[in-house]
Image (cartoon, helix red, strand yellow):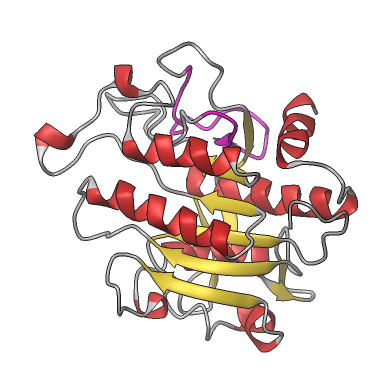
Amino acid sequence: PYTTLFRSNVIIAVIDAGFYRANETPELRSIFQEGRVIASKDFVEPYGNVFNEAEHGTNVLSIMASFLPDTFIGTAPKAKYILLRSENIYSEQIIEEYNWAKAAEFADSAGCDIINSSLGYSTFDAASQSHTYSDLTGNCTPISKACTMAASKGMLVVNAAGNEGNSSWKYISAPADSYGILSVGAVYSSSAPASFSSLGPSADGRIKPEVAALGASIPLVGGDGAIRVGNGTSFASPVVAGMAACLWQAFPEASAQEIRSAIIES
């Protein structure tokens, strides 16, 4: 899709922890009925079913893909989607960063235009695997290397900045430090920064996150099909990813980096 001058139904890969019952929720029914979920794959359990796993991905997907007129419409309701599971919510191991790399490679092979990744890594169950703030240079951690590479392939990568603003860590987490991507922080409806939103800069002094979007008390859909509100940069990220898809649809000759720059400069 990167050499054509026409983009119809931009393809968004959602890399997350699972999409519990996303294929059954009324708000997301249209993307399945219209065949706009073009692939799904579980990189945690090779023979797993992403629709039986965590609902976090369902929450994230709903912010972009929901289409229930007069009730809930997402930021990119007519895009095509690839649903990929890389995160295991039952433990925190560095292998999940490698799962992410495999998911991004799969997305690239399937013709993905945009990756939304509402994931971040800093500390792990095994302390020896944990990162430090000095690792956040965009080219140190496995997932940040993979994320930077994904961006270099012509995809627009949108990643949550992290929810560590109120913690002792407080900074962004990997891969929000990657080069060539959009790292997204969260704001309240007043446009004031959300207190939980992770802070920059990257360890090598780059402005991170580059942009922010509504991420506090934001409507989303759960695995039970109920609409509720949630907090997190995880939910600010798909607001921006969906907006980027619409912008790219309007300017199909633009490159991923031109779309990224336009959003930052706005």
**Main SS of the magenta segment?**
loop
Apparent side of residue 255 relative to residue 109 in the rendered image (left or right): right
Residue 54 visible: yes
Q: Is 186 a magenta residue?
A: yes
Up the image or down, 81 lies above or below 95; here it is below
Rendered-image quadrant of the N terminus: bottom right
Rendered-image quadrant of the C terminus: top right
Report the residue that reaches farthest toward the front.
3
Q: What residue is drawn where x is 74% and y is 29%?
A: 261
Q: Is 31 a magenta residue?
A: no
Up the image or down, 73 lies above or below 112; here it is below
Q: Position of residue 98 (x, y in %)?
A: 31, 49
Q: Position of residue 169 (x, y in %)?
A: 29, 25
Residue 217 visible: no
Q: Position of residue 255 (x, y in %)?
A: 77, 41
9 or 75: nearer the viewer: 9
Q: What range of the chain is rendered magenta?
A: 179-201
Choose top left, top right, bottom left or bottom right for residue 144: top left
Q: Position of residue 263 (x, y in %)?
A: 75, 34
96 or 246: nearer the viewer: 96
Q: What residue is drawn where x is 56% and y is 18%?
A: 207
Report the residue that reaches farthest toward the top.
205
